Image: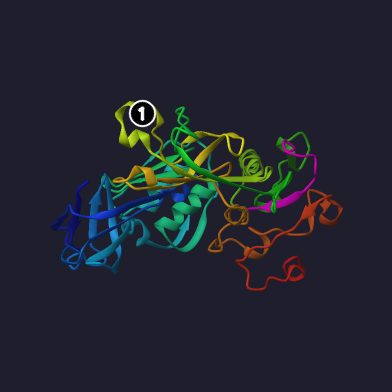
Amino acid sequence: MLIKVYNMERECILYVKDYKDLKRESALKMGIRSITFLCSVQEGEKIKNEYYLEAAGDEYVVKENAWSGNGYRKIAAELNLEDIKGNPHIEFKTQDGGVQAKDCADAALKGTGWVCISEIGEDKRRLSLSNVTSYEIFEAICDAYTCEITWDTIGKVVYLKEAVGKDKGAYFTTGINLRELNDNNESYDYFTRIIPIGADSLGIAGVNNGVPYLENYSYSNKIKTLIWEDTNYADAEALKKDAEYKLNELSKPKKTFSVKITDLASMKPDYGFLRYHIGDTVLLVDSATGTYDKQRIVKMTEYPDDPQKNTCELSNTVLSFEEMQKKLFAAKKAIDNVTNGNIVIGGKVQGLKANQIEGLEIYYTEALSNTKIEDICK
């Protein structure tokens, strides 16, 4: 792999060939990628912070240049999204009836030189944000439209997808390409019922056979209820659809696997059928732990020059509970009425009092400076 170095004026000043310990990291969440490597002191001194790197079809911005010992400097760079992250919006607000994801993305990208290609359907959502960057708007888009994102930093294209990656039949199996597997199962934050509330106390009873809540008992018959209120929703069908998505994430114990992989597809052309990418669904088979399970790759660490060191994190949920909770209770930058929207309120919900709902657990948003629940619910 050849690493091209550009200065801040976009002039190519260096080709780094003799590097070592090259590592690429990628995450499904917001499509983030980064790169680190060691190079000689002579070359490293020419690579300044905020210079640009081009490698393996991506463009990066140098964020770290540090002495590593033994005549090397460590260079660390992140995906070049500076046009997105540095583009401010004092106020970003869609029309009251909501807009499609593509329209929202196009508005966020105005003036950046980037374009959006969207595979998202015709669902409409409302967004109302203040003092945000285009990148933060895309975080809100991924929240509101329950979609995923990838970035083409060379072509300056943002891709919005219902799901990144595919199930191509790849597998990680002991004795073939799986060197080590560690698993973790936890259900500290687990719910089987959700009561969704949109703008102006909008509920889903009218589109859900008169029932104001959704249930999912695929794992157990316990009743654990969560109230979710988000004033970005003015359409009951959309509110119900996204509540189903969120409940599906929360109604099962979170299962996470950390694996060490020998990337045979990168070593031998004949093993191309075992190639994997971020977001792909992969079959895990491990005789030592009795694992036989399909999971999505949510994080990857690749060593292009030493594929036997590759690692992956796989999970049955894309988000941690903390991230899901943030989605449920909306961003603190929303300029809608914060004291009556985007938080969980312990009062009446479609005629039900909170203290009458079996298994109810009430949360409040970290966006509030006064976090006493009795004050929030006044």
SS for callout 1: helix
Mark 1: few/some/many CA within 10 Å (<14, 14-19, 20+): few
| Residue 277 locus on image (x, y percent) | 41, 39
Is residue 272 at all visible to an observer of this figure? Answer: yes
Q: Main secondary structure of the magenta part?
A: loop
Magenta-span inclusion, residue 220: yes
Lateral position of residue 142 relative to residue 233, left or right:
left
Q: Quadrant of residue 13?
A: bottom left
Q: Name the quarter where the C terminus is drawn.
A: bottom right
Residue furthest toward the bottom? 370
| Stretch of the chain drawn in magenta | 216-230
Q: Give 153 or 91, whichever is nearer the viewer.
A: 153
Lateral position of residue 67 relative to residue 378, left or right:
left
- For badge 1, the amino acid type reads Tyr
Q: Give 210 or 150, whichever is nearer the viewer.
A: 150
Q: Mark 1 = which residue?
A: 271
Image vertical order of residue 290 relative to residue 114, above or below: above
Magenta-span inclusion, residue 196: no
Image vertical order of residue 340 relative to residue 299, above or below: below
| Residue 164 locus on image (x, y percent) | 45, 39
Is residue 125 at all visible to an observer of this figure? Answer: no
Lateral position of residue 124 relative to residue 265, left or right:
right
Image vertical order of residue 339 relative to residue 351, above or below: below
The tally of labels here is 1
Q: Give 351 or 288, whichever is nearer the viewer.
A: 288
Which residue: 61% across, 42% down? Answer: 242
Which residue: 29% across, 55% down? Answer: 60
Q: Quadrant of residue 339?
A: bottom right
